[in-house]
Image (cartoon, grey):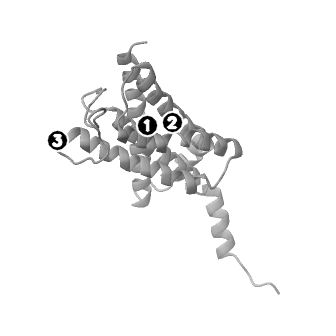
Amino acid sequence: MSVEVVSTFLALLALGAGFGVLATLTLWVLDRIGLVPGAMDGFTELVRPAALWLAFLVAAVAMAGSLYFSIGAGFVPCDLCWYQRIAMYPLAPILAVAALRRDPRVAWYAVPVALIGAALSIYHIGVERLPGMPSAWCSLQSPCNVIWVERFGFVTIPTMALLGFLAIVTLLLVYARPAPAAEETRDHLITNTEPIS
């Protein structure tokens, strides 16, 4: 398979992840402002059972894609790429174990790692797109402003990483969100407590 085919496939997956993040954010806003009450409840019920496995899948595909770009395509990863890998690679086994155990607290230890990776990706995109942006990490042997892959006019490797990190964060937050039935039960218990006689 050619680098062009693989990079286009990975870019399409990243864009799909980005649209998923945007759709989730839109539902959350519409629910919060009261335009579509209960929208997030229905979405949570639909996505929550598979959220951890989907987050693992995103991390595993991102890890495999980065390995393909460096080993299969021969692209030399820059230092910022390595730092993003340091954030992404551990997420794959962590999320696999969390999915197997159905760990309700996974967001506490996986979201911070994914947010650090997202911040590094944003900075890397800036280095790619803004000439003269300072980067103390970049070297002459593997400069951070080299764009190895660009699909659809804007999707580069750091853009794919950013969308992957944001998808993982979104899925983990959906998983951590209390189920609507649990909220109703909790609210019922709080409002209907009677003193014990």
Can you see residue 173? yes
Q: Distance between the residues labelled 3 and 2?
A: 31 Å
Vertical relation: 195 (above or below) 140: below
- The amino acid beneath tag 1 is Ala
Quadrant assignment for the N terminus: top left
Horizontally, is 173 left or right of 147 in the view? Answer: right
Give the farthest residue toward the left.
132
Label 3 sits on a secondary structure element that is: loop
Q: Which comes before the other along the chain, label 1 or label 3?
A: 1
Q: Nearer the viewer, mark 3 or mark 2?
A: 3
**Camera-side residue of 102 and 65:** 65
Look at mark 3 in the image and give the residue it sits on. 131
Q: Nearer the viewer, mark 2 or mark 1?
A: 2
Horizontally, is 129 left or right of 34 in the view? Answer: left
Residue found 47% across the figure and 56% down from its top: 37
Marks 2 and 1: CB-CB under 8 Å? yes
Can you see residue 177? no
- The amino acid beneath tag 3 is Pro
Q: Position of residue 110 (x, y in %)?
A: 54, 50
Look at mark 2 in the image and give the residue it sits on. 58
Q: In which quarter of the image is residue 5?
A: top left
- The amino acid beneath tag 2 is Val
Q: Distance between the residues labelled 1 and 3?
A: 28 Å
Look at mark 1 in the image and give the residue it sits on. 17
Q: Where is residue 120 in the image (x, y as percent from the top left)?
A: 37, 47
**Camera-side residue of 99 and 133:** 133
Q: Position of residue 109 (x, y in %)?
A: 56, 54
Label 1 sits on a secondary structure element that is: helix
Few, some or many residues within 10 Å of mark 3 (<14, 14–19, 20+) = few
